[in-house]
Amino acid sequence: MRTIVVGAGIVGTSVAHALLARGHDVTLVEGKGVAAGTTSTSYAWINSHKKHPESYHALNYEGLKHWTKTIAPEHPETVQLNGHVEFALDNEHRTTLTQRLERLQSLDYAARWITADEARQLRPVEIPDDALIGFFPWEGHAYPHLLCRLLIAQMQQNPSFSLIVDPATSVSRSEGRVRLQSGTELVADAVVLAVGNETTKLTATAGVELPMIPREVGGAAFGYLAYVQAPGHGLNGPLTSDHLNIRPNGEDALILQALDLDVSADPDKEVPPQIGEEFMRRLRTLLASDAAELDEMRVGHRVIPGDGLTVAGPATDAPDNPLWIAVTHSGVVLGPWLGEALAEEITTGKTNPLFEDFRPSRFSATAQIPAYAAPRKPGDQ
Ligand SMILES: Cc1cc2nc3c(=O)[nH]c(=O)nc-3n(C[C@H](O)[C@H](O)[C@H](O)COP(=O)(O)OP(=O)(O)OC[C@H]3O[C@@H](n4cnc5c(N)ncnc54)[C@H](O)[C@@H]3O)c2cc1C
């Protein structure tokens, strides 16, 4: 088949890679540059931690397994799966951590309580003796932009692959084929749109309604990430505390998240200096070394479909529909597995039962979409 994938973030790159591996001709059309979107401004915690409902947990669990069994052995520089430590001091956090850990145990997910001594062995930070501490051994953190670059370099060895850097402006279906306008007109047997936050705009050109959450300051869409130089930090995996999440960004740097501060995150404004100062104040309560220095503050734009859940599958339920959509929050966890699963459906025509709750057609014009709550608490993302 002649296929086109639009968007070279973690989702589109993974779909393109999986289609090429199945013997199709693949053109990857990217508007700005490889991993130029949310994929490069992500906390990239690999987990299936607080994923509701259970069908969404099942998808994320597949994503986590795929990182463990396929990506980590093939591209070890893109992920570290050394578990995740979370400690709670305040009462509300103790309650929610207990609820999450017990739920995950009931789902046969690796999750257990550990002592402060064990936690300090795992993460060399200040953890008080009276903290309540959970350990989630399967989890970890990834470098998704790096994985995109590696997969694209690999695909470029194959003459059936091409990369076009030019934004797609419209897409239309006729007689079982798809036409895509991107500088020139491209025609294919199947097109997959994986354009993250540009989804609503591009699907509309094909007459398909696919709402994303509002692009609103104070809502769920925007989140701060602090990039910090911290030579010799000694962390080998993510740590969640009452007011700060930290993860390694290589051996000498960290990425920090403080979800309660996200209320003011605005991609159209400079980040106020007091936000960076507050991140560093919180970091100093955890890290003994005072060599840490704030490098950069960024505002990420979460890719979240209107009801918060993944969208994966044919744009409409019509038989032989050649237009496909892949858009999701938790796209780092899900992208590589989602790419394989969608490419398999496109190739074989066999539907994957795991996608049953996640088809694009659920967004009919009349459906009421429940509001999506902003992630502000430990364990959210
Ligand atoms: C603060 C923050 C924290 C997060 N933490 C996590 C986490 O811990 N774990 C996790 O799994 N996920 C996390 N996410 C979410 C995750 O990063 C995203 O779900 C994922 O990166 C989405 O990937 P994508 O490929 O769908 O989108 P993107 O990376 O945005 O890629 C879309 C691509 O499409 C291109 N494009 C757009 N329009 C066009 C067009 N018209 N023509 C051609 N190309 C186009 C863009 O340039 C871009 O390169 C987080 C996100 C944020 C913001």
Image (cartoon, rainbow, N blue to C red):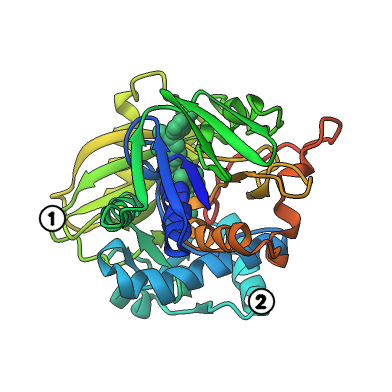
Q: Is mark 2 within 8 Å of ligand 1?
A: no
Depth check: give the residue in front, 353 or 159. Answer: 159
Percent position of residue 34, x then y:
32, 41
Percent position of residue 278, x then y:
34, 37
Task: Specify whether residue 258 is in view.
Answer: no
Please tell me which residue is depicted at 76% across the width and 43% down the height of the picture. 361
Percent position of residue 271, x then y:
34, 25
Task: Specify few, some or many for label 1: CA neighbours under 10 Å numbering under 14, 14-19, or 20 or more.
Answer: some
Depth check: give the residue in front, 229 or 213. Answer: 213
Label 2's element?
Answer: loop
Percent position of residue 222, x then y:
49, 33
Report the amino acid beneath label 2.
Answer: Leu
Label 1's element?
Answer: loop
Residues tagged 2 and 1 counted as in contact (Cβ below 8 A): no
Report the amino acid beneath label 1.
Answer: Pro
Q: How many marks?
A: 2
Residue under label 2:
107
Residue 192 located left or right of residue 225: right
Residue under label 1:
231
Vertical side of 345 occupied by 180: above or below:
above
Task: Specify few, some or many for label 2: CA neighbours under 10 Å numbering under 14, 14-19, or 20 or more.
Answer: few
Residue 87 located left or right of residue 79: right
Please tell me which residue is depicted at 68% across the width and 58% down the height of the picture. 52
Task: Specify whether residue 372 is in view.
Answer: yes
Vertical side of 61 occupied by 90: above or below:
above
Please tell me which residue is depicted at 43% across the width and 64% down the height of the picture. 21
Depth check: give the residue in front, 358 or 295. Answer: 358
Picture disc at residue 31: none
Depth check: give the residue in front, 276 or 343. Answer: 343
Q: CA distance from mark 2 to mark 1?
A: 38 Å
Please tell me which residue is depicted at 52% across the width and 63% down the height of the picture. 340
